[in-house]
Amino acid sequence: MRLDKLLSNMGYGSRKDVKLIVKNKRVTVNSKVIKDSGIKVDPNHDAIMVDGIKVEYKPYIYIMMNKPPGVISATEDRVDKTVIDLLTPEFKHYDPFPVGRLDKDTEGLLLITNDGQLAHQLLSPKKDIEKTYYARISGNVTDIDIEEFAKGVILEDGYQAKPAKLKIIQSGAKSEIEVTITEGKYHQVKRMFEAVGKKVIYLKRLSMGELRLDETLKLGTYRELNEAELSYCHSIK
């Protein structure tokens, strides 16, 4: 990889900026001051330093966010704030994107990465990755609904959803439930409850595969995945 490309990818500015950093003798490779920003380097073996600080090369980033309501799951939007807008520049320069989508008013677990292969595996219908949500429902959720979800409810457009696991936490006029699905159709959980005559009034994603929302994350905050979570991600690639 070219040195200027590497440093630019790691957040040291544009290639023009990097060229100036090199010109000012601020960059060393294997303890040697570099004069040419276009030289080839191996970030996995060469010791690259800027202003005496080692450059820690990471080709990919993996971020867990507790998505807040009112923010859309997209990389950019002319009207609404996006989940990428919530990130600091040190992460934005990796050009990350959200894996899948949570509705604008939905909260909870959202994985943000620049690893396209992982995103494909997590979202592939063939993988049947389970996604679990907590929801508050307007309407009394009963065992009949559990049976309907287990069979696969038929949505308003005639599509039969895959079987889903429905757990009642509290029943009544305002029910509380957890539901686990393996697909991600547009507004799917909301449409599934509409199909059985009820309405979702609050929705929060708790988990995606073995990735579970860190409950210490406040709405709108995020952290990089820990080693166990990264191990899971690498296991499904």
Image (cartoon, grey):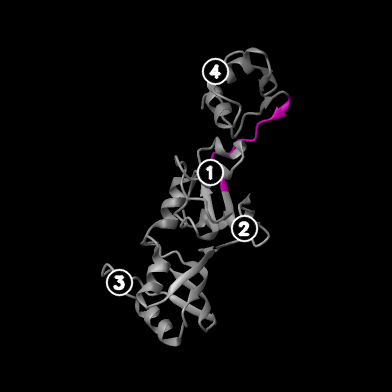
Q: Is residue 39 visible?
A: no
**Amino acid tagged 4:** Lys
Q: Residues within 10 Å of mark 3 (few under 14, many from 20)?
A: few
Q: In this image, 232 relative to 34: left or right?
A: left
Please rate how many residues cluster around mark 2, counting C-alpha atoms within 10 Å: few if below 14, some from 14 to 19, many from 20. Answer: few
Q: CA distance from mark 4 to mark 3?
A: 54 Å
Residue 98 located within the stretch drawn in magenta: no
Q: Which mark is residue 160?
A: 3
**Counting other residues with Cα less than 10 Å from the Cα at mark 1, is it few (<14), some (14-19), or many (20 or more)?**
many
Residue farthest right in this picture:
52
Q: Position of residue 140 (x, y in %)?
A: 47, 83
Magenta stretch: dominant SS? loop
Mark 1: secondary structure: helix
Disc 4 target residue? 16
Which residue is denoted by mark 1 in the rendering? Answer: 84
Camera sees residue 133? yes
Q: Secondary structure at mark 4?
A: helix
Dot 1 or dot 3: first in sequence order is 1
What's the mark number on residue 228?
Answer: 2
Amino acid carrying label 1: it is: Ile
Which region shows up in magenta? 52-62
Q: Is residue 58 magenta?
A: yes
Answer few, some or many: residues within 10 Å of disc 4's Cα (few below 14, many 20 plus, some between 14 and 19). few
Residue 106 vertical position relative to residue 155 in the rendered view, above or below:
above
Q: Please, is residue 145 above or below residue 13 in the view?
A: below
Instruction: Tell me which numbered mark, 3 or 2, is placed earlier along the sequence.
Output: 3
The tag earlier along the polypeptide, 4 or 3, is 4
Q: Amino acid at mark 3?
A: Gln
> Residue at coordinates 46% horizontally, 41% vertically from top-left?
76
Q: What is the spatial separation of the Cα atoms under label 1 and label 2, in whole angstroms?
A: 24 Å
